[in-house]
Image (spheres, grey):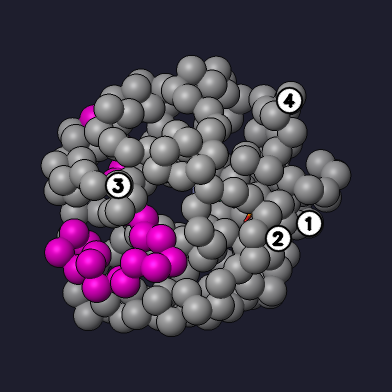
């Protein structure tokens, strides 16, 4: 049974890529709420990961929400392909030089949930004019591109400020954090106002038998 309303979205970037289907089955069984898919193009970020064909082939292994984190520039070319591949939510980066309102409208018109992400160096104030258009705000707590990096404590204030912006506006978007999340940093993020936690190495670097326990630890003590 769920301990609280915190959602855990394991990032398969840290999974064993030779058996991604099985890894998704294992985290699904272990109680993952969403599956986080990091899409990197070697241009917006200095790393390459997976495209829509891989996402489409993974869709059969779970009914959980596919949380697609799009780190590509341009972004718009990839919205429809990932929607067709089975994405439930697509999060675009505000730094990806796209017309944010237009991209969010495309995602919404494709029938998906909309997300906006900001890198650690981007101030949260840039989000203000888009908040009523998005279902999710993704706060990067490392520089996007690689798993296994150290959580940036400086981002906690940003999470608190976004939570305040949410309270002031009465909007109900999810506040997701991504990068360096473990059982200690997850607690700080939850206290700051986050309700969705992405975790790669904190889950997949251990044996699959431990996934349930690790996911529960991230949810915190409540
Ligand atoms: C980084 C990715 C993250 C990454 C998180 O650009 O967006 O989702 O996989 O990995 P950990 O939890 O290992 O920091
Ligand atoms: Zn991510």
Circle 3 residue = 96
User: Which residue occupies the foreground of this view, 216 or 121?
Assistant: 121
Instruction: Report helix, strand or loop for mark 2.
Output: helix
Q: How crowded is mark 1: few (under 14 residues within 10 Å), some or many (20 or more)?
A: few
Circle 2 residue = 216
Q: Which residue is drawn at 56% across and 55% down?
A: 198
Residue 158: horizontal and vertical position, in percent?
Answer: 40, 76
Circle 4 residue = 19
How far is the residue under mark 1 from the one under mark 2? 5 Å
* Range of magenta residues: 110-131
Residue 193: horizontal and vertical position, in percent?
Answer: 45, 75
Q: Which of marks 2 and 4 is in front?
A: 4
Q: Residues within 10 Å of mark 4 (few under 14, many from 20)?
A: few
Circle 1 residue = 213
Residue 106: horizontal and vertical position, in percent?
Answer: 19, 35
In the displayed structure, would residue 165 be above or below residue 203?
below
Asked if disc 1 and disc 2 are in contact, CB closer than 8 Å, the reply is yes
Residue 210: horizontal and vertical position, in percent?
Answer: 83, 50
């Amino acid at each position: 049974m769920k301990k609280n309303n915190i959602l855990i979205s394991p990032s398969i970037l840290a999974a064993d890529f030779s058996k991604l289907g099985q890894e998704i089955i294992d985290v699904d069984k272990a109680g993952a709420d969403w599956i986080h898919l990091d899409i990197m193009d070697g241009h917006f970020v200095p790393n390459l990961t997976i495209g829509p064909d891989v996402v489409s082939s993974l869709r059969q292994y779970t009914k959980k929400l596919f949380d697609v984190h799009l780190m590509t520039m341009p972004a718009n070319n990839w919205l429809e392909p990932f929607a067709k591949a089975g994405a439930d939510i697509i999060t675009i980066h505000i730094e990806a030089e796209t017309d944010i309102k237009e991209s969010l409208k495309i995602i919404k018109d494709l029938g998906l949930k909309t997300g906006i992400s900001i890198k650690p160096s981007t101030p949260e104030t840039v989000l203000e004019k888009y908040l009523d258009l998005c279902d999710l705000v993704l706060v990067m707590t490392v520089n996007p591109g690689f798993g296994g990096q150290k959580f940036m404590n400086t981002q906690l204030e940003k999470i608190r400020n976004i939570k305040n912006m949410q309270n002031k506006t009465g909007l109900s978007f999810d506040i997701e954090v991504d990068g360096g999340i473990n059982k200690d940093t997850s607690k700080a993020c939850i206290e700051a106002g986050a309700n969705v936690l992405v975790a790669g190495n904190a889950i997949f670097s251990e044996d699959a038998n431990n996934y349930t326990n690790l996911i529960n630890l991230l949810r915190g003590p409540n």
